[in-house]
Structure formats: C-alpha cells, structure tokens
Amino acid sequence: MPNTQSPDFFDINSLLSEDERQVRDTVARFVDDRVLPIISDCFENEKFPMELATEMAELGLLGPTIQDFGCAGLNQVAYGLIMQELEQGDSGVRSFASVQSSLVMYPINRWGSDEQKQRWMPALAKAEAIGCFGLTEPDGGSDPGTMKTIAKKDGNDWILNGAKMWITNGSIADVSVVWANTDQGIRGFLVEKDTKGYTTRDIPHKFSLRASITSELFFDNCRIPDTNRLPTAEGLSSPLSCLTQARFGIAWGAIGAAMACYREASEFASERILFGKPLSHKQQVQVRLADMLRRITTGQLLALQLGRLKDEGRIHHSQVSLAKWNNVRMALDIARDARDLLGAGGISVECCPIRHAMNLESVITYEGTETIHQLIVGREITGVAAF
C-alpha cells in the first residue's frame, strides 16, 4: 500500500541506498528531538537556535559532500535528504546549514588556496567557525552583475568598499565570502570578522525566517590582504555557481516543509468533527489532501532525479532552476492550503503551516526569485535571454 503518512506515495524510499536512508533517518530524529521542541519559540522570539550548530556539525551535516577536512563525503542525494529533513523543522535551520555548506565551504574548497582551506575548512565543518555569503546588495538582487561593492588593489592588499544586504548568518559569521568588482572583473574575498572598517547590522522585525539571522554587511575602506582573495575565482560565474549549489539544496528542502504541512493538515482532518463526521470524510477535503500529495510526490521524484544527475556530473543549472521554482511554489501553495484546512487555529505558531508559509515567502524569493528561474528555463527553451 502507498505510504500517505511519510508521505511516500510512490515508494521513493526503495530507490534510495541504505546509506541514503540512514542519513535521512538520522537527520529526521535530530529534527524531532532537538529542533521541533524549540523552533516555535525561536520563531516567535526572532532567535536562531545557535546551540544546534555544533550538534549539526557533530552529525556531519556541514559541508557533507566534501571529501576532506573532516567532512562526511556523502553523495548529492544524501545532501538533498539532509536539507529535506532540516526544513521539515524550519527553513531557518536549513538555511544555516545550506549557507555554511554551499555558499561558504563550497567556494573555499573549490577556489581557495591551500592555506585558506587548511585554515577555514576544518573549523567550518566543526562549526568552530561560522560563515556567510555576501553577494546581494541594497540596490540589486536579481542582477548581481551591477554590484557596487568595489575592491581596489593597493600594493599587496585590496581596499574594499560597499555594502551587502539580506545576508544569512551575517552578524555571527567569523568569515564572509564577499564578492566585489575589481579592475579585473568580479572577484571573491574572505573578509574576517575583526577586519577594521567591517561592520554588520541585523535586520529586525521580519515576518519570515524569524528563526534565522539576517544581516547587512558594511565595508568602509577595509584593507584585505591578497592572501584573502580566492585565487581562482574569476568573474560572475563563480558566485552564480555557488547559488546553483544552494538552489539544489533548496529544491529538496522545500519538500520537507510541504511534507510537514501535509501531515499536520491530514492528522487534523482525521480528528476534527464537523457536521457529525471527520473532515477527512468530506469530498472537498479529500480532494485538497490528494492534491497536496500529488504535488509532493511530483517534487520528490523531480528532486531525486536531479540528485542522481548531479552525482553523475550531468546536471545543468537550468534543471536546478526548474526544480527550485517547482518545489518552492509547491511547498508554499501547500502551506497556505494546509493553514486554511486547520481553520482559525491555523494562524497560531503552535501549528506549523503558518510558520512554514511565512518562511517560504522568503525561500521563493532568495537564491533567485520565481520569475528569474522561470526566465532561466525560458532561455533554455528559446535560446533568448528575456531578463
């Protein structure tokens, strides 16, 4: 019989290896035991559960696909499953792990010098150091090529000026991977937290990703040694390839949020009595639950094939865009519908759909808006860029 509670209607579990299932189940237990008991309070009080960072590191969830530096060396499907399970807890928890892994450890491992790798990678894997990724600016998000942050060469140093905005982990980061325009084009720099002229400011009063730290970064004549430049990161393609890594994880993570909302709505419908019968006995409710399950199953199959392609080295960034677009839209629609099925109680932070819905309003925007991903796929179809 199909599993509608997990939900796993097409027995996707049977398509996973034993190692992949073990990773998924380990993270699921972590979320049940450590994330869910505290996340509503963290969300309500705009607090990131920093104590979970070390625990995630101990489970090997930071930089898990990297082979060296004490990382787990898992495949891409296992990484996707990690993101899926973390986001069943909260998008903010998944965002922390996603930024640390895909936007900080990935570029240092790919483009960093041996010295940079030895200094930062083991510490980042253990959560002894936290990182952030500075690309988005106050005046531009979807068009990063127009960035105004500038780095000018001065002897063996670089002088960095500019600002970044909407940066996850910004104020708690020990190292920031910052992208800036130079005379030679866009380059990446590792900016350490105690650098003179470098300041951060948290963005308060958010109604989304409240259990996540979001910051502004400011650079006022920051002197950065050339040894802190990522030596082989050249051009806009470098930060964009980092975003492809992060978007891959988001495509999986959104499934987790949708699964959590579906389960809560399904359980409520089976228990809530209306006009003498459980809600689950009503035609419209069954149609809505069936539609949620249809969308989740589609997203699961899409993400799994995406992961297999990535493990085979055959993935294309437009495929990641389609998956991120499809799965986040799916999750947001399910979160909203699940909230409605829960009735008036659904607006309470004690119910997960309203929290997931509010978080997903950010997830559908960051790492490329829905429209940007639609246009990326459109460019592949037509051969014409219509941005």
Image (cartoon, rainbow, N blue to C red):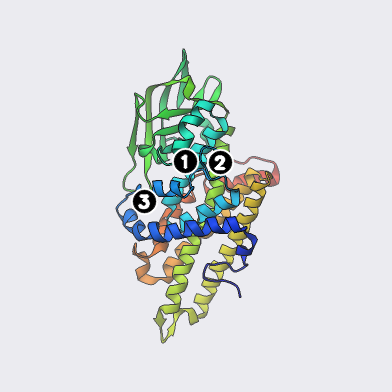
Count neighbours of disc 2 (C-alpha within 10 A) and say few if under 14, some if 14 to 19, many if 20 or more: some
* Percent of width and height locating residue 142: 51, 40
* Placement of the N terminus among the 4 image quadrants: bottom right
Residue at 53% of width from left, 29% of height from top?
112
Q: Which of 323 and 109 is in front in this view?
A: 109
Marks 2 and 1, how far apart at CA: 10 Å
Mark nearer the N terminus (3 vs 1): 1
Amino acid residing under circle 2 = Ile
Q: Nearer the viewer, residue 116 or 223?
A: 116
Q: Name the residue under label 3.
A: 211
Marks 2 and 3, how far apart at CA: 27 Å
Residue 236 seen from this side: no
Residue at 58% of width from left, 38% of height from top?
241
Amino acid residing under circle 1 = Ala
* Percent of width and height locating residue 382: 70, 45
Q: In which quarter of the image is residue 124?
A: top left
Amino acid residing under circle 3 = Ala
